[in-house]
């Protein structure tokens, strides 16, 4: 079953570091079978009061693959770069 990694970027505190992250992260996501399905863009709130700021969603073949990517040596430095550069939320979902 597919898995989805949702990141809601609330605030970027270091744009230079985030630019480096953006330039380097795609090959690492690809290496673990992931693909971006949402990167920002327009959205419409249909119910409730929650309002994402800058949504990012990555699809992986399985939740196990998503966790392998997130915890990998290849992603470790990039993850630290992102976490130190933004205020955000992250949630992993298993699809159906």
Image (tube, rainbow, N blue to C red):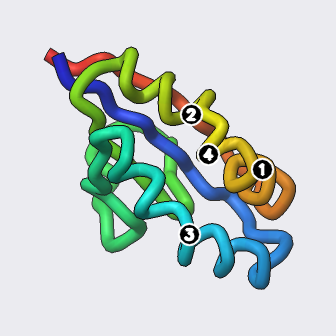
**Within-10-Å neighbours for mark 3: few <14, some 14–19, many 20+:** few
Disc 4 designates what residue? Answer: 75
The disc, 2 or 3, on the residue closer to the chain's N-terminal end is 3
Residue at the image position 31 percent from the left and 58 percent from the top: 38
Which label belongs to residue 70?
A: 2
Mark 1 secondary-structure assignment? helix
Q: Are marks 3 and 4 in contact (CB under 8 Å)?
A: no
Camera-side mark, 1 or 4: 4
Which label belongs to residue 83?
A: 1
Screen quadrant of the C terminus? top left
Camera-side mark, 2 or 1: 2
The disc, 2 or 1, on the residue closer to the chain's N-terminal end is 2
The disc, 3 or 4, on the residue closer to the chain's N-terminal end is 3
Q: CA distance from mark 2 to mark 3?
A: 14 Å
Residue at the image position 25 percent from the left and 54 percent from the top: 37
Camera-side mark, 1 or 3: 3
The disc, 4 or 2, on the residue closer to the chain's N-terminal end is 2
**Within-10-Å neighbours for mark 1: few <14, some 14–19, many 20+:** some
Q: CA distance from mark 2 to mark 1?
A: 12 Å
Q: Are marks 4 and 2 in contact (CB under 8 Å)?
A: yes
């Amino acid at each position: 079953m597919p898995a989805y990694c949702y990141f809601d970027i609330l605030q970027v505190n270091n744009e230079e570091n985030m630019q480096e992250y953006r330039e380097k992260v795609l090959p690492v996501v690809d290496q673990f079978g992931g693909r971006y399905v949402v990167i920002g863009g327009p959205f419409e709130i249909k119910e409730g009061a929650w309002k994402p700021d800058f949504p990012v969603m990555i699809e992986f073949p399985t939740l196990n693959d998503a966790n392998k990517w997130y915890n990998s040596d290849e992603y470790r430095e990039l993850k630290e770069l992102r976490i130190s550069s933004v205020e955000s939320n992250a949630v992993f979902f298993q699809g159906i």
